[in-house]
Amino acid sequence: MNLRPVIFALAVLAAPAALLGQAPGHFPPDSLINVKVIPKSTPVMQVVGIMRNFAGGLGVRCQFCHVGQEGMPLGQFDFAKDEKRTKLTARQMMRMVDEINRRLDTLPEHAQMTSHVEVTCNTCHRGVSRPMSLEQLIQETAQTAGVDSATRAYRALRERYYGRAAYDFGEPTLNISAFRLARAGKYTEAFAILRLNEEQFPTSSNLATFRGNIDLMKGDTAAAIAAFREAVHRDSTNGEAQGRLRQLIRP
Ligand code: HEC
Ligand code: HEC
């Protein structure tokens, strides 16, 4: 008698049980199951510490990368499963960070330095999952979803992140977004973004200079002259605006 089909059938029956046996029931788990970058012998509590740093660095919770839901006990998460794209990306990021730090170790001055700066997730992420600069984010939003969406996004981000390292709400950010929009021929959007910036920095001479430069890109000389005059009025030492005015008003 051929037993192989029977054994095969038993194996199939046994499979769910084996999976259940592995299924998490308590947290922290007893051992590591599916780590490919972290050495398997690492104490579980140390891994949990690394994971807390990931979550903090990216401003997310465990379920951003792991199978589980908000409010669910951690014991019911399936941390070993590779199901979410973000977990796979995170693994690549771990390899990238190792590589960066290995490269930093080769700096000529490394051996003599009394302290070393180690690159971590937070070096780039600073509390957000996709660490895009605010100028790029606003420029892209204005271009793809419209300037009203970009304005709303800026206000919401400022509300949430002001004073944190995630985004730079200083004056240059929106000036740069506006300039890049103008370079892409999106003048209406560019001026709207400058007006948004002017709410925060109503007396900035530099901002008026940007406005003048964008007027020039658009070919509106009269508006450019007015903007550069405003820039000089706001700061009489603004050399760029003075230079532009000399060029524009020269007979
Ligand atoms: C940004 C993505 C990300 C976040 C957020 C994250 N993890 Fe992880 N986690 C990973 C990756 C990637 C691995 C696998 C590491 C490897 O392959 O070496 C992992 C592995 C684990 C493991 C080991 C699983 C196994 O195979 O045995 C545990 C336990 C774990 N994470 C717990 C947590 C907890 C708890 C949190 C929330 C505090 C968390 N993780 C947040 C990406 C993340
Ligand atoms: C050198 C800078 C840098 C470091 C360090 C870094 N990341 Fe990233 N990470 C990025 C950039 C840039 C992106 C966005 C890529 C894109 O979407 O174009 C990103 C994207 C991600 C994403 C996808 C986010 C999403 O919403 O799609 C995850 C997850 C992630 N990183 C995890 C990590 C983890 C975990 C670490 C630390 C082990 C880490 N990163 C370290 C630069 C970095």
Image (cartoon, rainbow, N blue to C red):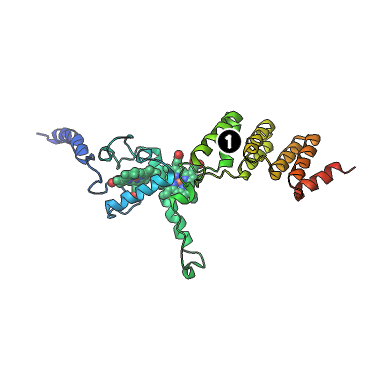
Q: Residue at x 61, y 32 (%)?
A: 143
Q: Residue at x 80, y 36 (%)?
A: 221
- Label 1 Cα crowd, 10 Å radius (few <14 / some 14-19 / many 20+): some
- Foreground: 214 or 41? 214
Find disc 1 in the rendering and name its residue: 140
Q: Residue at x 56, y 41 (%)?
A: 134
Quadrant position of the C terminus in the picture:
top right
Residue 36 appears in the rendering: no
Q: Is residue 175 left or right of residue 29?
A: right
- Foreground: 207 or 106? 207
Quadrant position of the N terminus in the picture:
top left
The amino acid at mark 1 is: Glu
Mark 1: which secondary structure? Answer: helix
Residue 56 position, x and y percent, is 40, 46
Residue 72 position, x and y percent, is 29, 35
Q: Residue at x 56, y 45 (%)?
A: 168
Q: Is residue 55 left or right of residue 22?
A: right
